[in-house]
Amino acid sequence: MPVRYDKAMSGLTGGSRTGFSSKSFHASLKPLGGLYVVLEQVGKEWKIIYCGKGKNLQNRLYGNLLNGQPRSHTLSAKLIKKRGLGGKPNVKKFLISSCAVRCYYEDDARERTFAEHYCISMFRPEMND
C-alpha cells in the first residue's frame, strides 16, 4: 500500500462508524471535503459496499444520499437498480436499517480523487463500477 494513502485507508477501515439512523448523523458529519465508505451490516460483519468523495461530506451524505433524489447520488441509483429497492423511500429505509458510514477528511481535491480511486481498487465495493 502506498504510504501516501495509509492515513486515509486506516481512517476508512478502522475509524468509528456512524449509523444513518443516528439522531446525530447530520451533526457528526463535517461540512468539509473528504472520502467516505458506506458499510452494510451482513450478520455480525460490516462490508464496504461503496467508496465516494465529496467537497462537503455533510451535504453529500446527509443531503444527497440520505435525503436527496436518486439521481443526486450514484449509490441511491445503484441500490434501486442492482438491489431492486424500487425507489428513494426504500433506499432510505435500507440505509437507516442496515448501513453506516466512515469518513476521512481531506482538503485537497486532487488527493481526494487519487485516494478514492486507490480505495476502490483496494476494497472493490460492489456498488462502485
Image (cartoon, helix red, strand yellow):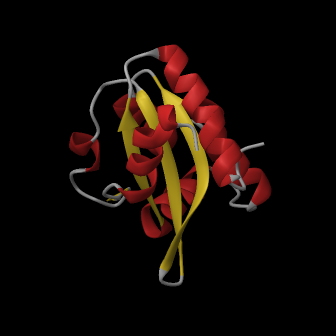
Q: Where is residue 41 in the image (x, y as percent from the top left)?
A: 51, 72
Number of marks:
0
Q: Which quadrant is the N terminus positioned in?
A: top right
Residue 83 falls left or right of residue 29: right
Q: Which residue lies at the image location 60% right of the left edge and 42% below the top edge?
A: 119
Q: Can residue 121 be seen in this view?
A: yes
Q: Quadrant of residue 49?
A: bottom right
Q: Position of residue 20 (x, y in %)?
A: 38, 56
Q: In this view, does 54 lie above or below 3?
A: above
Q: Is residue 5 above or below residue 99?
A: above
Q: Quadrant of residue 103?
A: top left
Residue pushed farthest bottom?
43
Q: Quadrant of residue 59?
A: top left
Q: Which quadrant is the C terminus positioned in?
A: top right
- For the residue pair 119 and 96, the one nearer the viewer reads as 119
Residue 37 falls left or right of residue 105: right
Q: Which residue lies at the image location 49% right of the left edge and 69% below the top edge?
A: 98
- For the residue pair 122 and 21, the one nearer the viewer reads as 122
Q: Which residue lies at the image location 64% right of the left edge and 53% below the top edge?
A: 123
Q: Position of residue 48 (x, y in %)?
A: 57, 58
Q: Which residue lies at the image location 58% right of the left edge and 34% below the top edge?
A: 116
Q: Position of residue 81 (x, y in %)?
A: 78, 52
- For the residue pair 55 and 97, the one nearer the viewer reads as 55
Q: Is residue 99 above or below residue 56?
A: below
Q: Is residue 67 visible?
A: no
